[in-house]
Image: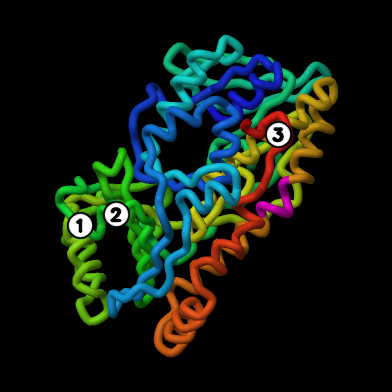
Amino acid sequence: MTTALALARSGFRVVVLEQAERLEETGAGIQLSPNATRVLGALGLRDELGQRGVAPAALRVMAAASGREILRMPLGEPAAKRYGAPYWLVHRGDLQAALAAAVARNLHITLKLGLHVDDFVAHANGVTVSAHGRAGVVDERGTALIAADGLWSAMRAQIGYGGVPRFAGRTAWRALVPAKDVAPQCRDPLIQLWLGRDAHLVHYPVKGGNLINIVAIMEDSWNAPGWSEPAARADLLPRFSPRHWAPQALSLVSAPEAWLKWALYDRRPLLSWSQGPVALVGDAAHPMLPYLAQGAAMAIEDAAVVAHHLARMPDDPTAALRAYSAERRARAWRVQRLAARNGARYHLTGLRAVARNALMRTLGGAWLLRHYDWLYDWRPPHAYSSS
């Protein structure tokens, strides 16, 4: 929907084919860093998302065993001034609702639900897309096809990149819990990251601070494909030993009774994300492991850039999409690599963990924020820069 809004802003008529029968509030928390909120603000969503989200004051990194703070990276007003855009913590359902409302208001966008895209054919006049739903087979014709169908993308294979995602050897568990059910320090407007033995824990408030989003990621061999499946507190708690986790962390993971878990997968980088008048965006092009909180942000950046190049070359979508892929590739690769390295750093043990913590304390939170300038201070094409 972000890509559709960006394309409509550039003057295109857009048809969105979505396989879900209806849009529902699903998922849990999501972090939107300034490189993403800058684009969303330009698309008219700043006020709505600002009201729905939480602006974290800082990223607080904790040592799991001792419960001591390692460093605190400033966010909030300092980051907003530094980058000219806010850092928000939102519920995925709130982000989807804001995007869906903007799509519904836009006369240049048609959203069609309950349609599963099967195939496409490129021809002299653009591309014809074949999809099926309850009413049967539907054909849509357009200038270009933008595939935003995620990690398990079918369109990725259709443009010649076969293979399946690779299991990353870890699972992620997520839950939402009412803020009133957790300790006061867990309700603070902070992103709190606990670095533990072969695991890490992240939690932060969403829904205006009324809910706490919790994510635990750990080494695992369970690798069922797909998005997620239900799990129970009794399955998770044995993985958090009191020998290796402070009481505050144990209290937090004990709060939710119901969890969802999913296996983490990634893919090898692609040399190109387009073929003719067809291109991939988001996880279909460059899936991100979650250790940098940039999966959604990279897809939002993609939306602005692909719309910009199609607007520059509306009569040559093949060249436009090739230019989009060329512009985005190096940055996406860099983010993918850094996310993977963070995953290794987060799960260090023994003396290596002690050395990591000591180095982080020495460098400090202000240094860490400057270290991410290249990431957070990314500027979209001028037409998508919010005023």
What residue would you read off at disc 1? 184
Viewer-side label of 3, 2:
2
**Image disc number at residue 188:** 2
In-image side of 375 versus 1 (left or right): right
Mark-to-mark CA distance, 2 and 1 = 7 Å
- Judge depth for marks 1 and 3 and give the one in front: 1
Q: Residue at x 55, y 33 (%)?
A: 40
Is residue 168 located in the magenta-colored stretch of the structure?
no
Which residue occupies the foreground of this view, 384 or 243? 384
- Residue located 48% across and 15% down the image: 104
Amino acid beneath label 3: Val
Check contact, mark 3 vs mark 2: CB within 8 A. Answer: no
Give the CA separation, mark 1 to mark 3. 44 Å
Q: Is residue 330 magenta?
A: yes
- Evaluate if marks 2 and 1 touch, with contact meaning CB atoms under 8 Å apart: yes
Q: Secondary structure at mark 3?
A: helix
Question: What residue is at 22 percent from the left and 61 percent from the top?
Answer: 253
State whether residue 44 is above or below residue 91.
above
Mark 1, secondary structure of its residue: helix
Residue 162 position, x and y percent, is: 64, 48
Q: Which residue is mark 3?
A: 306
Residues at marks 3 and 2, CA–CA distance in whole angstroms: 37 Å
Per the rendered image, the range of residues in magenta is 328-332
* Quadrant in the rendering for residue 160: top right
Corner quadrant of residue 16: top right
